[in-house]
Image (cartoon, helix red, strand yellow):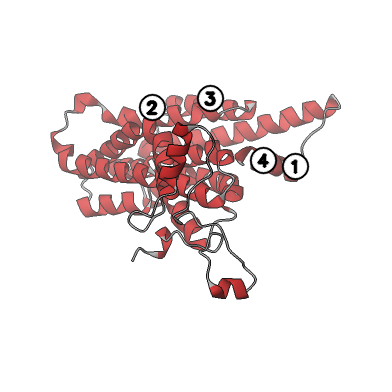
């Protein structure tokens, strides 16, 4: 018996039973039912459609496997970066004198490489604990934005799916989910697509962490694998930067981090993040005021949220 998270019969897609009929639920579509799909006249399409409607495998319906595989293919180009990112973090764990199991537990429970690396670097720099924690919290504040954007995408999911997928959300998985959500209006298919991308990506990250912890002491320093971290964020974030204030915030952050590199305890990262947030916020206010003077329409907070939700769907 599979755990409830993966059980395909859920509140919105249930098999027909007498009880459900008496409750007025009627017969609901079931993705795991062995039915014959309608013929489209295209043999290749009919063959593919038929494959997705055959009996369940490992207790999971064929259609769920198809959707999960689509999610895997969508995120697959980013997986080498995930493995390398995990390798970079894992290699830092023994270098900072951190217990290997503690480092691995961080990857399982936090799943946010940038903040994990910032904490390890703070430990190596003998920074006070509150600086390390504060820096990590600010770095991870972006997940609050992901949560707001993914809210409409996850809205119709059962609670266990919301909680499970929320824990598996990384920058890459969130971007892929938002980019492809409109292709899956059916919430059942949509959540299996997201799971198919998020879960393998996290598993690759964990494998990279383990390899890094074990091989860290023998990796040459000349490889400079820590440089993988900024490259990974550039690959994920640059394609989705659209607003001028986002570009301003990113640019100010980069400049301040480089100029304040001499600050102790790695405070240049924290300083750069705060400066970028302030610069982006002030630029957005300036742009809104300028549009107001020109008589152009300005979105209210509610309208902006609705537009963001529409783009996510």
- What separation in Å lies between label 4 and label 3 (alpha carbons)? 28 Å
Q: Which residue is disc 4 drawn over? A: 310
- What separation in Å lies between label 3 and label 2 (alpha carbons)? 15 Å
Q: Relative to residue 15, is residue 58 drawn left or right?
A: left
* Marks 1 and 4 close (CB-CB < 8 Å): no
Query: In the depicted view, which residue is nearer to us: 70 or 83?
Result: 70
Tell me which corner region of the image, top left, top right, bottom left or bottom right, holds residue 293.
Answer: top right
**Dot 1 or dot 4, earlier in sequence:** 1
Secondary structure at numbered mark 2: helix
Within 10 Å of the Cα at label 2, are there few (<14), some (14-19), or many (20+) other Cα atoms?
few
Mark 3 vs mark 1: give the one in front: 1
Residue under the image location 59 percent in, 55 percent down: 156
Mark 3 vs mark 2: give the one in front: 2
Q: Relative to residue 57, is residue 164 drawn left or right?
A: right
Residue under the image location 60 percent in, 40 percent down: 312
**Dot 2 or dot 1, earlier in sequence:** 2
- What separation in Å lies between label 2 and label 1 (alpha carbons)? 34 Å
Q: Which residue is disc 1 drawn over? A: 303
- Residue 221: x, y in percent? 20, 28
**Dot 4 or dot 2, earlier in sequence:** 2
Mark 2 vs mark 1: give the one in front: 1
């Amino acid at each position: 018996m599979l755990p409830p998270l993966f059980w395909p019969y859920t509140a919105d897609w249930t098999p027909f039973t007498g009880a459900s009929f008496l409750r007025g639920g009627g017969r609901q579509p079931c993705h795991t039912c062995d039915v014959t799909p309608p013929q489209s006249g295209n043999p290749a399409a009919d063959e593919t459609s038929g494959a997705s409607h055959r009996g369940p495998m490992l207790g999971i319906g064929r259609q769920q496997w198809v959707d999960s595989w689509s999610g895997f293919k969508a995120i697959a180009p980013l997986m080498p970066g995930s493995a390398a990112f995990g390798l970079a973090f894992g290699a830092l764990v023994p270098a900072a004198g951190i217990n290997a199991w503690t480092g691995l537990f961080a990857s399982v429970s936090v799943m946010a490489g940038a903040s994990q690396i910032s904490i390890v670097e703070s430990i190596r720099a003998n920074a006070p604990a509150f600086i390390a924690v504060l820096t990590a919290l600010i770095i991870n504040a972006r997940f609050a934005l992901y949560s707001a954007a993914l809210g409409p995408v996850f809205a119709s999911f059962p609670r266990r799916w919301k909680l499970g997928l929320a824990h598996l959300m990384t920058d890459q998985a969130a971007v892929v989910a938002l980019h492809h959500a409109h292709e899956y209006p059916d919430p059942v298919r949509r959540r299996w697509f997201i799971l198919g991308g998020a879960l393998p990506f996290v598993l690759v990250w964990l494998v990279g962490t383990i390899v890094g912890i074990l091989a860290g002491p023998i990796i040459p320093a000349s490889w400079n694998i820590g440089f993988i971290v900024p490259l990974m964020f550039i690959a994920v974030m640059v394609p989705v930067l659209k607003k001028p204030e986002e570009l301003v915030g990113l640019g100010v952050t980069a400049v301040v981090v480089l100029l304040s590199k001499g600050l102790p305890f790695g405070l240049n990262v924290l300083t750069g993040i705060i400066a970028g947030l302030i610069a982006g916020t002030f630029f957005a206010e300036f742009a809104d005021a300028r549009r107001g003077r020109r008589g152009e329409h300005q979105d209210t907070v509610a309208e902006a949220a609705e537009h963001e939700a529409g783009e996510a769907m």
